[in-house]
Image (spheres, helix red, strand yellow):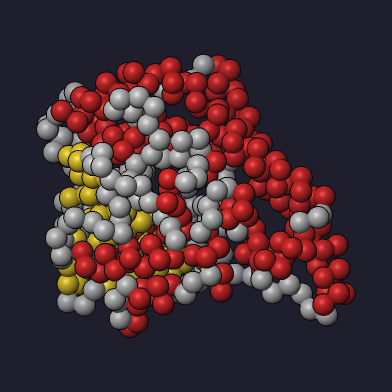
Amino acid sequence: MNAIRDIDSLVDPTHDELARQGFVSRLRKHIMKDVADDMRDAYDVKVKPAFLCEYGREPNSGEEVRDAIEDNLTYRVWSSLRYNAQEMVWDSVREEVERQLPDMISIADQAAQSSSHGGTLTLDPELKMPDYVDTLDVHLMPGCWQGEHADRDVAQGAIYAHGGLVFRGSLLPSKTRSGVAASVSKWLSIRFPDFKPEKILETGCTIGNNLFPYYDIFPDAELYGVDVAAPCLRYAHARAASRGVNAHFSQQNAETLDFPDNSFDLIVSSFFFHELSVKATKKTLAECRRLLRPGGMMVHMELPPASQVDAYYNFYLDWDNEHNNEPHYRDFRSQDCEDLMTSGGFDAEDCWTALIPDVGGATPEYFQQVALGEVPPPQHGNYTSWSLFGAIKPA
């Protein structure tokens, strides 16, 4: 019997807190579906025809759509509601996290002091925070990922974990959706059946949500996660310890890691690079190439490049650039993924991009057909499909 308690289970909302969280999730769903549909109608009926009349063509970029629609009342209502609902996500879980924080810190301490689970936690209090994390509350989450308010704090990890449930609850078409890591690991097992990674690294791992599922497909692999945020790493380590997952977490900047050359068979990330500057992205991809063993692979899940979707969807995705404290969002999406990877030292012929369904939202037959390239994937959308880019380091 594992002696480390499940740190997630300590957060126990009251009736009113749970009701509020449910309201916020449903409000976000209304905003992201119903009001968003109204905004698209307003664009098609009013904004786009007016632009066509003035310029003799339709908008051909997200920026042009944004400039054309920003005075439209439906857009302004949608944008205001979305911004406020984003803040409400984190506030809806704050009090319950604060109430249970001493017990959560105690569990994280116990996990850090125990070696029975095989994992490790290495923190660097001298680590300099990169500007793209330190200067903004990314996602409008107060304190961002790395803020510390108590000794050995885990609050930001807990707020990210439980606020994330409120956030995702508004997007899930059904409870069968599985998420990034479950989908990518299953896709790898089908697409590359002989690929059996022994050491897996996730950059920007936060609380381990998109690291742990690799253990289900590759149970013999050692898992490693790096992040700059100590509160998230403490929380992730406690989660791994309670689950008996052999995972090693360290506080590092992914641009410059302390692992030796050729350390990993698989390097992954999820929703990571759009938070980095393009310069930092190129440095991180160069680190990925250095750290991969010959024959190893990197697979990064990200937002689709601007070149792969239409102008309106670019506008819709890039709302976060101005309003969700993610100022590198548009710059990242404007890049060509192959160019980014080759700038990191990969050869063009070893690079690839892919779109895959969410494994929980697709039938096993359809998922396998997409993985093998026999049928096209679904269009990109919330928990419908995942956009990937990656490369293989030649053996």
- For image coordinates 29% across by 28% down, the residue present is 152
Spot occupied by residue 369 in the image (x, y as percentages of width and height): 42, 68
Residue 173 is at least partly visible in this image:
no
User: Looking at the rendering, in which quadrant would you find the N terminus?
Assistant: top left
Residue 158 sits in quarter: top left
Spot occupied by residue 92 in the image (x, y as percentages of width and height): 55, 27
Residue 43 sits in quarter: bottom right
- For image coordinates 73% across by 46% down, the residue present is 78
143 sits left or right of 203 in the view: right
Which of 371/327 is in front? 327
Spot occupied by residue 94 in the image (x, y as percentages of width and height): 49, 26
Residue 23 is at least partly visible in this image:
yes
Which of 144/41 is in front? 144
The image shows residue 193, relative to residue 19, as above or below, that is below
- For image coordinates 26% across by 32% down, the residue present is 238
Spot occupied by residue 50 in the image (x, y as percentages of width and height): 86, 68
270 sits left or right of 30 in the view: left
User: Looking at the rendering, in which quadrant would you find the C terminus?
Assistant: bottom left
Which of 110/282 is in front? 282
